[in-house]
Amino acid sequence: MSIHIYNTLTHSKEPFIPGEEGKVKMYVCGPTTYNYIHLGNARPLVFFDTVRRYFSYRGYQVQYVQNFTDVDDKIIKRAEEEGTDPLALAQKYIEEFFQDAQALNVKPASVHPKVSEHIPDIVALIEQLIDKGFAYQVEGDVYFSVRSFEGYGKLSGRSLDELQAGARVEVDARKKDPLDFALWKQAKPGEPAWESPWGMGRPGWHIECSVMSLKYLGPHFDIHGGGADLVFPHHENEIAQSEAACGEPFAKYWMHNGFITVNQEKMSKSLGNFFLVREILAKFPADVVRFFLLETHYRSPLDFDDQKLLESKKALDRIKNTKGLLQEKIAFLTSVNANDDYLPEESTARKIEQCREEFIKAMDDDFNTSLALAAVFELCRVSNSFANQPDLPQKPGALGQLKRALTVLEEMVVEVLGIPLQREETARHNQDGAMVTALVELLIELRQEARAKKDWGTADGIRDRLKEIGIIIEDTPHGVRWKRAEQ
RNA sequence: GGCGACGUGGCCAAGAGGCUAAGGCAGAGGACUGCAAAUCCUUUAUCCCCGGUUCGAAUCCGGGCGUCGCCUCCA
């Protein structure tokens, strides 16, 4: 079984065959940086980061390009409102982008090219399109002529005539065809502008992605991704420009994630019902948000509300509990000098490997994270059962199996899905951590004394009060376990 | 108007012709516990409706109802 990918271009799942053995070249459309990113931006960000992680896990060398649109009408408008410089504004939100991305444990791409730094490349490609007869100049603007490109509409599955019939775009009499789109826009006074053969101006929206993907990945790379709303017109136009210019096929696999809805309605900038990642991270831990985004298959719509995040948090806690239990038992068996040979024929060992195989099978099948999580939970169940056996130290290969279970769990959840499995609070309060630990342990000691005297009132009182503070006490046959409650 | 997607247990969500329809959350019962917590075990589905194809359909085809999206900046 190899990795299979649903390709928007062919409307079917196809086996992934890289252009270059052992390598994956992927380009994912990045944000227009005129504001903090919102949840809708977070989905492709997290999902394609997971794709990239999975390819690495499967032994591929991944070259991942994600652009920033830092030259754009919306940025200009916003800068005008705020009385700032458009490029400075864009730069500010690029920096903010990295903060949110980092919080969501998204790795930086191999390259993050910006439009503003590729103007000469863009101009060169536009010139090439004009030379080949695919584009034409009208005053200071340059348009791509959709009629001149035979394959126009192949990605979105629409013919030019169909598009024309339903067109809502206002007709610009200077265009040869209403669907022709701008490659270069003449600048109005005060707007950011660069020199070009057609006068001062700036690039249109679509050309940048063609230019930057071609520059960093070459004329035919493996994967091009983005949100489903980019299929038309953005990606359709990219294909037209790129293939017209190069005369050869552009990206091979086109992947598009579904939308996030709020109250079953599309979250969009124009509706104003979008949530900033920042706002959500103020209410929920970042790992829960990432987990939530991966619980649903990437091509399905995903409805957001607080209640669902809360459920995700509980589900994720289950995984964290297993990790904690495994660590605890590993420490215990290590302290009694148990042998840590791994005996793969033991029944638990076999179940662990089976979970791992299920996980890979699920991810191979068009990155089915939802099904992959089922394998993770199965591993949790298997691990919990095994680790909680009273005669664990007598089990052959017990320590080896616990260690293997932990390794597999971390591979799947931390390495591939990108969920750190850390207790956030512990990480956050490092400074006071030692003192808190000492204090909690003192209280636990006092409580144990009360319990020894069967003074349940005092014992329960301490436990309840600690819980209010955010410390959870669990009595086990081998002593007391405590942890911080998150949130 | 043109094009497309979706409708699975109380909720979320996999599955895309054939063993008992994954998994999570919530609920119920049990084990463990001084009581809890955590954990384990058991338990909850005429797969929107109506036709059709097939030995066999949640899965394929047709029709209906419903929801959503794209065609305009959007991930």
Image (spheres, coloured by chain):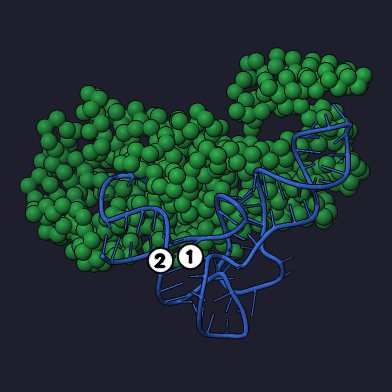
Chain colours: A green, B blue
The amino acid type found where label 1 is placed reads Glu
Instruction: Tell me the subunit letter for badge 1.
Output: A
Residue pictured at 55% horizontal, 39% vertical: A307
Closer to the camera in the image, B38 or A247:
B38
Q: Is residue A38 visible?
A: yes
Residue pictured at 63% horizontal, 16% vertical: A431
Q: Are marks 1 and 2 on the same chain?
A: yes
Query: In the visual, does B29 lie left or right of B46?
Result: right
Query: In the visual, does A313 lie left or right of A185?
Result: right
Residue pictured at 72% horizontal, 40% vertical: A322
Question: Regarding mark 2 in the picture, which secondary structure is present there?
Answer: loop
Residue A14, which numbered label?
A: 1
Find residue A131 and report its horizontal and vertical position in percent. 15, 56
Closer to the camera in the image, A169 or A177:
A169
Query: In the visual, does A241 lie left or right of A100?
Result: left
Find residue A237 and report its horizontal and vertical position in percent. 27, 55
Find residue A151 and report its horizontal and vertical position in percent. 27, 66
Alpha-carbon distance for marks 1 and 2? 9 Å
The amino acid type found where label 2 is placed reads Thr
Question: Regarding mark 1 in the picture, which secondary structure is present there?
Answer: strand
Residue under label 2: A10
The picture quadrant where one finds residue A159 is bottom left
**Cβ atoms under marks 1 and 2 closer than 8 Å:** yes
Up the image or down, A416 lies above or below A248; here it is above
